[in-house]
Every structure is written in C-alpha cells, then in structure tokens.
Image (cartoon, grey):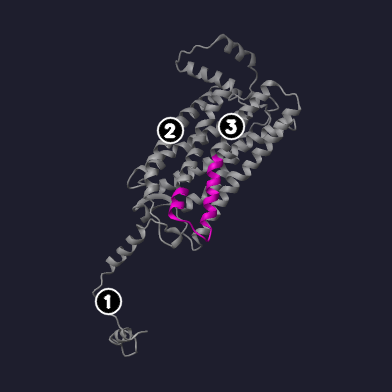
Amino acid sequence: MNDSTMQSLEDLPVTDGGLIKFDLSGLDYQDLLEEFFNSTDNSTDGCCDTGMVCSHNDVMQFEAVFIPVVYSVAFVLGVLGNSLLLAVLAQSRKTWSVTDTFILHLGVADILLLVTLPFWAAQATQDGGWNFGTATCKITGAVFTINFYCGIFLLACISLDRYVSIVHATQMYSRRKPWIVQASCLSVWLLSLLLSFPDWIFLEVLSDSRRGGKKECVHNYQLFNQSVQDWRLASRMLYHTVGFLLPSAVLVFCYSCILFRLQRGSQGHQKQKAFRVILAVVIVFFLCWTPYNITLMVDTLQSNSTSGSTCDERTSMDKAMMVTASVGYLHCSLNPVLYAFVGVKFRRQLLNVMRSLGCKLKTSVRFQSASTSRRSSFWSESGDTSNSIAI
C-alpha cells in the first residue's frame, strides 16, 4: 500500500469503535439500480460464458415473423383437414373398425392442439406479449401438452393393435367387447392429463427484462426452493422419456416385426396397402418430431454444462428450437393429407361427404368400379386394418 493510499484512508471519518464511516446520504439508490440493470440487460457480445445476460432482440425479431406465418398455415390446414376427417368418420360411424376409433381420437387431439397455436402466435406478434391472463396461460399450455402426449400414445396403440393382429394373428380388440377400445382411449386421455400437471403448476405470465419487459406465458420453476435447473431438467427428462423415446421404441419394434412378417408371409394386397398407410403416418411423425427432440436434448446438455455458451450460440439454439418445434406442430396437419392421398376408402367417403354438402363431383368409372370391388365390411373380428374407413 503506497503513501497516498494510506493518507486517503487516514482522512476518512472514524467512529468511536474504530469503524470507518461513509456519508452516502447524497446518493440516489434508484438511479444506481437502474444503471446497473441497464448495463447488464443490454450486453450482447459473447456474454453468456462470462456471467453477463444476453439480449434476445434478434430472437424476438425472428420470432415475430416466423411463428405467425407457420402457425397460421398449420392452423388453417390442420383444422380444415382434421374436420373433414371427423366428418368422414361421422358419416360411417356404424361401421367403424378399431383403427377408426383410434384415428377419431387422434383427429380430436390434433384439432385441440392446433386451437392453441393462435394464442402463441399472438404472443409472438404483440409488443406487450401475452395479454390473455394467467388462467388462459395455464389452460392453453395444459391443453397443448395433453394433446401432444395423446397423439403419440394413440399412434402407439394403433401399432400395438396391428402388431398383435398381423404378427400373432390374434385379436387385441373384438366386436363383442367394443368398450375395451373406448377404455384404452380413455386411459390415454387420463395419462396425458396426468402428464400435464407441471403446466397447471408452473405456467405463469412473467416479464423478462432481456426481452424488453415483454410478458410471456412460461414455466416459472422458481416457485419452490429447489434449483431452477433441477426442475427444468426433470421436466425435460419426463418429456424425452415418456413423450418420445418410449413411444418411439414401441412404434419401431411393432412395425419392424410387422414388416418382417409381411415380407415372409403371403399377405393380401389390400392388407399390405393398408399397412403402408399407417406406416406412412408413423414415418411422418418421426420426420416431424425427431429434429425437435434432438435439438431439445442438445439444449438440455448445454444448459447443464459447466462450460457455458456464448450469446451467439444461445441465439442460434433458440432459433433452432423455434424452427424444429414449428415443424413438429405441422405434423397435426399432415395426417388427413396422408389419408386422402394414400387411402382409397377415405377418398371415397370424402367424396360422399362433399356430395352430401352439395358439391357436384365427377368421378371416373374406373375409380367407381375399383371402389365397389374393394367395398367390404368395415369391421372384422380380427380388427383388420384394411377395414378402416380412413384407409
């Protein structure tokens, strides 16, 4: 310590107890606090790995353009397509097969999930962010989660039914006990509701200073004394395992066994064609949701890494999650398209629905004769997929 420093310390006022006394009466604490938070909130260059806070302006600008466009397309196409699917099923409700029952619930789940998209699009475009209140935030988030889980679980149920019917030549469901199918669907909805409990508990409307004080419907993991990272990690692990990995393992196993059996045995052409429709639905599911799950896993690993990440890396990851999640939501719009382009019976029933609505459609004699030759009972004791209206 040099002499000048010692002299400045000696000039400081000292109390009777030997403690140095500072006169802070002239300072404005509010100005000091505002200056401190403004200096941290506006930091943008390589900040995350130094403990500073990243700005989200770039992400917000991208979000305000990308999300409304993609969500609007998914909402319009999805609601229209799934509504036509439900209309086709309603017209032939007396001849439903097991697969048709599952497809009915899948269509309802897709529509309910799509109905939540306008809320998220409005949050992205409005300057004030989420203006619908905390109750709507919880309901919208929970409805989204319920129907996401319901969709993947119903696909798993369809794959199990096909596996038992084709590989083991036994009936998982029968016409004599239709309540078993309804009980399975009810179990799927109840399990999905159970998995949405974190949304009911943690979803809140919060303002983020890094996003200009914009209010957003997000999970507030600071409600309890445990670490925020622990709650976020637990929530994501639940999603990864129950919402993607386990159902995906069921789908891969069932359809691998079915494909192997079809290659070995002599199955009817109609049965193989019906299998291709369901297989196409599963493949499209993986193409839509796998990129998002991989991105979310990478983000989870980065969030729990001790090395940290730069603001540029954080911005890129946020954009990647936004894009891949939007691709996943488009999946809800694609199932009716697959049925329409691949399923002969669905096309025939769709034409009947449109005729009943007053549409004048011309169909070729060839198509009509082919449809008549393929017409059979929509229900069999084996629950054959080829008897599905949607196929």
Name which residue type carries label 1.
Answer: Leu
The answer to whether residue 296 is magenta is: yes
**Residue visible at 48% across and 61% down?**
224
Vertical side of 67 occupied by 233: above or below: below
Residue toward you, 101 or 285: 285
Vertical side of 65 occupied by 380: above or below: above
**How far across and down, in percent of the image, does residue 146 sit?**
52, 43
The region drawn magenta spans 289-317
Residue under pointer 2: 73
Residue toward you, 384 or 193: 384
Tell me: 150 left or right of 11. right
Nearest to N terminus: mark 3 or mark 1:
1
**How far across and down, in percent of the image, does residue 377 sit?**
65, 20
**Residue visible at 43% across and 50% down?**
315
Residue toward you, 267 or 220: 267
Mark 3 to mark 1: distance in Å?
Answer: 70 Å
